[in-house]
Amino acid sequence: MHYQISRQSNCSQYIDICLDINCYADQVVHLQLAAWRPGRYELANYAQKIRGFNVSFEGKPIGWSKKSKDLWLFQAIEAGTYQIKYQFYCNQMDAGGSWSDDTQLYLNFSNFAFDVLEIHDEEISIEIKIPETYQVATSMEKTGKNSWNAQNYQSLMDSPLLASIDLKHHSYQVKNSTFHLWFNGEIHFEVDYFIEVFRKFTEKQIQAFGEFPAENYHFIFQLLPYKHYHGVEHAFSTVITFGPAKSLKEKKELDELIGVSSHELYHFWNVCRIRPKEMRPYDLSKETYLDSGLVLEGVTTYMGDLFLLKSGYFALEDYLKILQKQTQKEIDQFGWRNQSILDSSLDLWLDGYKAGIPDKKVNIYNRGALISLCLDLILHKNGSSLSRVMKFMWERFGKSGSGYSMTDFYGLLKTESGHSQEMKDFIELFSSPGKDLLPELQKQLAWMGIALTFDYTSGPLLHHWGIRCEQEGKVTHIHPESMAYFSMMIGDKILSINQKPFSPEALQVEECLIIRVDRFGRELIINLQKDPSAPFYPIVNLLITTSTFLREKWMGNQNI
């Protein structure tokens, strides 16, 4: 198979695609376009961005049909090379999309390349018409000036390409592997320092798994002039979109960029190779239901941050700021009352990347990271670690190319904890809905000399009546155990309280509130008595109280 990609108008954002396929006489050819892409477990329906589809043989049109929204087919009349031509609209600038403008061509082949079902494993060659001044970042094998090869469809869809007039290249070496840093956009940080940070967390991750089975790996950065944050893992590369680029002068923003980079590198092992059995191999034509979101994203989120601590980029205080935010998110929602992390993983295809209805689900990244921390500390107390468990996952399921189940993961956790009752109880806790994670997290942190405490000084409306609202008075959350839950609505706009115009700063604790609200065009008066169930919505604080041997082991200052 051979793809030729060109553009008639860079700014139209359409690319012209010509696919050559060698067929035998009377062969029926099925062209399956992906409905989703790895790393994002929701339907994207890329077929909606295709236009002008046609098939020809020796310059003459050939009849074709569609079997579904993203499956085309045609029958070859005689043996020879058939051409499939179409256009794809490249207007999605994020780590999983495709983009075309006057300065760059950025392609994720999962968006528009066909899985030709009859020749699924055939080698694919790519030829792209781009200006002479463009540099190209991709993990694909280069075969000519503007041509590359992919081993097969699975390899092609996992190998993004960025061609740009502004592309800047740097690299560093760890053992026998070269790590490439490609920057598209303005750089507002010290590159040498950036490289050294990357070298250190790369070394720590490779040390944890024992090997890095790739000669080259590519970090491809889109540094944008507007606010943005996204990263996607691939077999031998990652694309990270971040903005505004100028904000990277500040350490807080640079922490975010380095954090997502560590996260995506960890995916080289976990997800790109250590995969659940349901994704062996990928079937991008339909939903692939998974209960393993804890391992896929929770463990990766936790480990990405932890390796920045272990490599020395984060001080303990820096790490605790991240943990504080994660814990605050956990406290501020009650989805755990209705779904376990396993249930929410299965429901990713419904609304996993949206806010969803109130208190229906948990976030597999955030709750998963907190669960992973607790697992790690339980394992450390029993002479092991979560990193050691993931190394075994790599050796048993990643290197072999076989898929794992959550039962396999649980088995390793139990074995590495010495079959401790504490581990068995904790697995039962997070695997079931209706279980509060905070008491367990508080207990585990105490073992490390870190106190998790709560503060209730952010405002009476939030803490005494359980109503969270925006600065202008729009209600965004209502605590389900508060009296307000039965009389206030999300979306209400508070106009006044006790006959005074709404102001969060001016509100005082009182015996009762007379609240005037605009409820979607209707004006109402709501009376709230002092709530006996208060306080609500605590603000989390983490305080280092004492040094402990467990904490030193966890941070990597003591050997396991």
Image (spheres, rainbow, N blue to C red):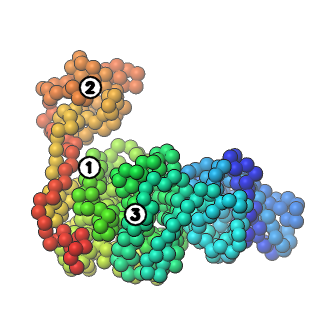
Q: Distance between the residues labelled 3 and 1?
A: 31 Å
Spot occupied by residue 66 in the image (x, y as percentages of width and height): 71, 57
> Which label's residue is closer to the chain start, 1 or 2?
1
Q: Which amino acid does label 1 sit on?
A: Gln
Spot occupied by residue 449 in the image (x, y as percentages of width and height): 14, 63
Residue situated in front as seen by the camera: 281 or 459: 459
Q: In this view, does 24 lie above or below 73?
A: below
Q: Name the residue under label 2.
A: 503
Q: How many labels does the image show?
A: 3
State the quadrant of the C terminus.
bottom left
Q: Name the residue under label 1.
A: 328
- Please report contact status of discs 3 and 2: CB closer than 8 Å, yes or no: no
Residue situated in front as seen by the camera: 443 or 293: 443
Q: How crowded is mark 3: few (under 14 residues within 10 Å), some or many (20 or more)?
A: few
- Please report contact status of discs 1 and 2: CB closer than 8 Å, yes or no: no
SS for dot 1: helix
User: Based on the displayed image, in which of its 4 quarters is residue 484 positioned?
Assistant: top left
Q: Which amino acid does label 2 sit on?
A: Ser
SS for dot 3: helix
Q: Mark 3 points at which residue?
A: 193
Q: Residues within 10 Å of mark 2 (few under 14, many from 20)?
A: some
User: Based on the displayed image, in which of its 4 quarters is residue 308 positioned?
Assistant: bottom left
